[in-house]
Image (tube, rainbow, N blue to C red):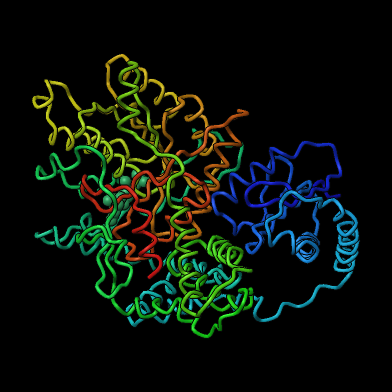
């Protein structure tokens, strides 16, 4: 049943191994070490590689890793118990050797102990299977996990009004049902954040409009489009297109000449408002606020994240039970900051795993160890494993007489076109000529929106300032045509016309819409862009993870390729609207392992930043 059980030191020296087949497991174990253990994603206690599932346990006192591997189609209920029992027995049996880090020792006489533990774990598993299902306790129920949701509902009167508004709409009633049945507190949070954004956009509109408002200026942004899910066999051409009016996003984005020259060179890092009573000022980079704190009140409610540790007494070695209250609170606060709930749980598991068995001194060191362990994990998650250097790669492509091609995908209304235009501004500021390929052939107004941006951008960087060369051109073929074909023609046109960079705008699509996801996979497969960027809103928590996972999976599944192209990086938009609820950044990078390449922070062409991992973690930990 089990294929492999191995015990090795964190330094990589194998101490003991039991293998029931002749299969070669080295690649799978190496993949586990590379992808999970070395990247400190230790909260994920199970890891799938090809057909294998690997589960592991860390021993932080003796620096050991215990790994068990089995075919993932098997449903084995006793693995956790087996790992724990083997872990305890091995520690107990070899404590003298382990204390002295005596890695070279004959650990083979562990075979008999292992067989006994395995037999009793298997029997335990059988007994469990026969037992009738117990009713869940209240603590295990979805209701008990509503703490964050309830906390947000009672935030203040203003929010109460928002809730009332939400309840009045049929959609919110549906959401409320979802909340109750799934215990998903995040649903309310998303709705509240969306309302908050809508109000902010309204406020911005009011400020800008001196004349009485026309119905058009009152618009607070596009409605999320509902695609026809007409079944998998429905032709793309038969899908009903939305009846959206042309977007006014292009009018909001300001073509202000004061912006010229502001984006030359590398994009600046995201900044966080400095906070006088904070003790970790080393995270602060300068004084200009981008993420504004709504009020001190929020700080008060979140400030106690580590105060719960005050009850901890120092003990020889830290036990799970000691950490549990703090971890529970930490999880709630991560969720409240928009980290997806599954990921919050994994992060807390990671902290637990790292601290279990740690020898600690006074209370002070317990509190700071928990905090710094979480901070380290978060910074690690957000720090790019791979640097995406667009300017360098575009120069390289130019030298080889090839256009550098970037494609943008994501659901509708997240800010694809707006942020594509900001990126275009940055590129022309750096003297690259750009072709925008209008491959959103579905949404009425999409092409016109790009045309307006093109006009604004050329007005900011006119041809006579660039050796009589037009800096931005639009490649468009109207609506209803095959997006992959238009992208291909655009790339060919750019190559022939010696245009440096092609930016492909694609239609917004819901992650579950199979025909449209197939079309996107085709566009990417056929055109092989240099960079596939997923555009997602910073407002969402669990939803962001669902979108990303499904986009990535669709690109894999529908590409008909053994080596499919998936998302290379993320554009995180509307960061200016989230206060300190920065969790989507964590969720998105955690789930894909891909970097956040750009952060959208507003509605002018210069509102584009790169992610500063420490600044985001700082906002998260308050
Ligand atoms: P698309 O459908 O994904 O192409 O989305 P659009 O580019 O049309 O943008 C949708 C709305 O989001 C527009 O009202 C934009 O002005 C707004 N938007 C886009 N990016 C940002 C951002 O970074 N901050 C803010 N506050 N609004 C943004």
Residue sticking out furthest to the bottom: 311
Q: Nearer the viewer, residue 474 or 135?
A: 135
In percent of the image, x 81 and y 73: which residue is there? 133
**Which residue is at a point 35% across and 66% down the rendered structure image?**
580
Picture quadrant where residue 276 is located: bottom left
Q: Is residue 560 above or below residue 129?
A: above
Residue 130 location, x and y as percent? Answer: 89, 68
Residue closer to the observer: 97 or 49: 97
Locate residue 127 relative to residue 558 in the image: left or right. right
Looking at the image, residue 345 sits to the left or right of residue 382; the answer is right
The image quadrant that residue 379 belongs to is bottom left
In this view, 615 is above or below 369: above
Image location (x, y in percent) of residue 185: 51, 70
Q: Nearer the viewer, residue 174 or 7?
A: 7
Q: For residue 485, say whether it is visible.
A: yes
Q: Position of residue 11 (x, y in %)?
A: 62, 49
Q: Residue furthest top?
A: 496
Q: Is residue 469 above or below residue 480?
A: above
Q: Position of residue 518 (x, y in %)?
A: 54, 35
Drawn side of residue 331 relative to residue 448, left or right: right
Question: Which corner quadrant holds the C terminus?
Answer: bottom left
Residue shown at 44% from the left, 64% from the top: 338
Residue pictured at 51% horizontal, 67% vertical: 175
Q: Quadrant of residue 291?
A: bottom left
User: How many marks overall?
Assistant: 0
Instruction: Relative to 316, say whether 114 is above or below.
Output: above
Q: Is residue 170 visible?
A: no
């Amino acid at each position: 049943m089990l294929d492999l059980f191995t015990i090795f030191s964190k330094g990589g020296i194998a101490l003991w191994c039991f293998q029931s087949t002749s299969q070669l497991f080295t690649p799978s174990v190496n993949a586990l070490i590379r992808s999970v253990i070395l990247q400190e994603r230790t909260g994920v206690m199970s890891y799938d590689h090809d057909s294998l599932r690997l589960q592991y346990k860390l021993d932080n006192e003796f620096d050991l890793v215990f790994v068990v591997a089995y075919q993932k189609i098997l449903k084995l209920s006793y693995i956790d118990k087996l790992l724990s029992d083997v872990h305890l027995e091995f520690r107990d049996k070899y404590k003298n050797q382990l204390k002295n880090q005596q890695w070279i020792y004959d650990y083979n006489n562990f075979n008999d102990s292992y067989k006994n533990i395995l037999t009793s774990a298997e029997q335990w598993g059988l007994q469990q299977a026969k037992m009738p299902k117990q009713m869940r306790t209240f603590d295990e129920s979805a209701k008990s996990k509503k703490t964050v949701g309830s906390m947000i509902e009672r935030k203040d009167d203003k929010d109460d009004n928002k809730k009332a508004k939400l309840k009045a709409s049929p959609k919110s009633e549906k959401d409320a049902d979802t909340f109750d049945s799934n215990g998903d507190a995040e649903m309310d949070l998303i709705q509240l954040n969306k309302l908050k954004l809508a109000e902010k956009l309204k406020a911005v509109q009011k400020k800008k409009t001196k004349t009485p408002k026309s119905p058009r200026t009152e618009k607070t942004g596009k409605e999320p489009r509902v695609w026809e899910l007409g079944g998998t066999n429905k032709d793309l051409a038969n899908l009903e297109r939305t009846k959206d009016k042309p977007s006014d996003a292009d009018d909001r984005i300001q073509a202000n000449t004061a912006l010229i020259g502001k984006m030359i060179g590398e994009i600046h890092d995201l900044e966080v408002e400095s906070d006088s009573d904070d003790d970790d000022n080393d995270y602060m980079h300068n004084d200009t606020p981008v993420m504004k704190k709504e009020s001190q009140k929020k700080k008060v409610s979140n400030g106690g994240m580590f105060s719960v540790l005050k009850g901890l007494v120092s003990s020889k070695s830290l036990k799970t039970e000691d950490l549990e209250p703090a971890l529970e609170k930490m999880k709630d606060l991560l969720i409240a900051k928009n980290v997806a709930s599954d990921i919050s749980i994994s992060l807390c598991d990671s902290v637990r795993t790292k601290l279990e068995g740690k020898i600690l001194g006074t209370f002070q060191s317990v509190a700071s160890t928990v905090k710094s362990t979480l901070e380290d994990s978060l910074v690690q998650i957000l720090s790019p494993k791979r640097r995406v250097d667009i300017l360098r790669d575009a120069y390289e492509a130019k030298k080889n007489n090839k256009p550098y091609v970037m494609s943008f995908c994501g659901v509708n209304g997240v800010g694809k076109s707006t942020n594509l235009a900001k990126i275009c501004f940055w590129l022309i500021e750096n003297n690259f000529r750009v072709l925008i390929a209008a491959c959103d052939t579905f949404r009425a107004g999409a092409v016109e929106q790009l045309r307006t941006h093109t006009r604004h951008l050329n007005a900011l960087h006119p041809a006579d300032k660039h050796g009589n060369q037009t800096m931005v051109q639009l490649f468009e073929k109207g609506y209803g045509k095959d997006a992959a074909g238009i992208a291909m023609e655009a790339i060919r046109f750019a190559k022939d016309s010696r245009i440096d960079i092609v930016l492909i705008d694609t239609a917004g699509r819901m992650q579950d819409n199979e025909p449209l996801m197939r079309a996107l996979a085709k566009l990417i497969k056929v055109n092989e862009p240099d960079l596939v960027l997923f555009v997602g809103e910073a407002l969402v928590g669990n939803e962001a993870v669902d979108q990303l996972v499904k986009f990535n999976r669709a690109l894999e599944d529908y590409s008909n390729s053994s080596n499919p192209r998936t998302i290379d990086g993320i554009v995180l938009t509307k960061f200016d609207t989230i206060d300190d609820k920065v969790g989507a950044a964590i969720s998105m990078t955690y789930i894909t392992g891909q970097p956040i390449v750009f952060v959208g922070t507003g509605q002018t062409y210069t509102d584009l930043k790169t992610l500063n991992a420490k600044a985001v973690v700082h906002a998260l930990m308050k």
